[in-house]
Image: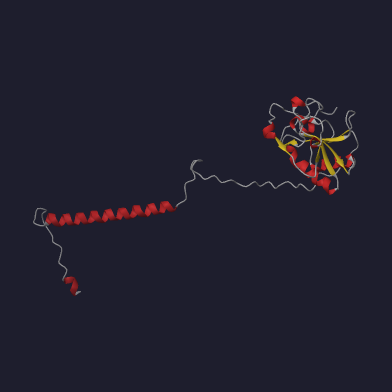
């Protein structure tokens, strides 16, 4: 091609000491160095861009990782339907389940009981509370119950209302130092026991509803010193350990 003939041929040298040899060698060396530097910068820039686009490594510490709260998978309890079948009968001086209360609701443990942590105030306009109508100087508060009792008690209120009755709370939490009417180891001293009566419904029918509502122990009590009532109690927690039942002989 004609234009190729116009390109001057590269100079050749037999010895590095010849004129212009050093100058031409330096030009080529600087050109190669510039190309190498530019290429290196481009490679570094591309690698940094790729690194920014990648997700953070999995070995981050707990302080740097964002805390994500997982929602609870447990469904809310149904407070309007029974959780057990009704017993065929519930006569006076009987209880469910059979046996002593300690095997159903567990023993009292005042050493670990904390009123500020474990007690709550129960309010419901459909319920009659004896302490709201007491005329003596007793400072009891029948609204105070253990938190473990809230769900079965709320369910009971709804079940009683469906039967057109009115639930009455005769006694709930009693401070151990002020307890004068219950046994010293009574679960009332932890707020895990409650005494109930009802208007518009027999105690036998109410006892069936208490069992259906989910109380761990229901006693149809007929003491001599006070009127008939139901004594209901609950475990401290669903997984709270219970004392072993004695072996049957």
Location of residue 195 with respect to 33 vertically, above or below: above
Residue situated in front as seen by the camera: 20 or 14: 20
Indicate left or right for 112 with 54 as reference.
right
Q: Picture coordinates of residue 171 (x, y %)?
A: 80, 34
Residue drawn at 22 percent across, 57 percent down: 31
Residue 92 found in image quarter: top right
Q: Position of residue 107 (x, y in %)?
A: 76, 29
Left or right: where 26 falls relative to 79: left
Q: How many marks?
A: 0
The colour scheme is secondary structure
The residue closer to the viewer here, 121 or 32, is 121
Say above or below: 19 vs 185: below
Residue found 83% across the figure and 42% down from its top: 167
Quarter of the figure with the C terminus: top right
Q: Does residue 196 appear in this view?
A: yes
> x%, y% of residue 134?
81, 34
- Quarter of the image for residue 239 reads top right
Check the picture and name the quadrant holding the N terminus.
Answer: bottom left
Query: Taking 111 as reference, is 153 above or below it?
Result: below
Q: Quadrant of residue 129?
A: top right
Image coords of residue 247 (percent x, y):
82, 28
Q: Is residue 238 visible?
A: no
């Amino acid at each position: 091609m004609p234009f190729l003939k116009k390109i001057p041929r590269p100079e050749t040298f037999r010895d590095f000491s010849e004129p212009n040899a050093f100058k031409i060698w330096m030009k080529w060396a600087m050109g190669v160095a510039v190309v190498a530097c530019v290429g290196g910068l481009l490679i570094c820039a591309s690698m940094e861009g790729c690194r920014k686009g990648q997700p953070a490594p999995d070995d981050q510490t707990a302080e740097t990782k964002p805390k994500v709260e997982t929602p609870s998978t447990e469904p809310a309890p149904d407070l309007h339907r029974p959780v057990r079948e009704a017993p065929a009968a519930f006569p006076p001086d009987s209880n469910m389940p059979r046996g002593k209360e300690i095997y159903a609701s567990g023993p009292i443990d005042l050493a670990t009981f904390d009123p500020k942590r474990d007690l709550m105030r129960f309010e419901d306009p459909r319920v009659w509370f004896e302490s709201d109508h007491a005329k003596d100087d007793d400072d009891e508060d029948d609204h105070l119950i253990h938190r473990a009792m809230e769900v079965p008690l709320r369910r009971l209120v709804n079940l009683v209302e469906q039967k057109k009755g009115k639930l009455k709370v005769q006694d709930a939490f009693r401070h151990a130092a002020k307890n004068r009417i219950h046994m010293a180891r009574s679960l009332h001293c932890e707020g895990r026991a409650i005494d109930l009566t009802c208007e518009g419904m027999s105690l036998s029918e109410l006892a069936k509803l208490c069992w259906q509502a989910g109380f761990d122990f229901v006693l149809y009590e007929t003491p001599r010193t006070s009127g008939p009532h139901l004594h209901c109690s609950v475990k401290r927690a669903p997984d709270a350990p219970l004392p072993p039942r004695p072996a049957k002989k």
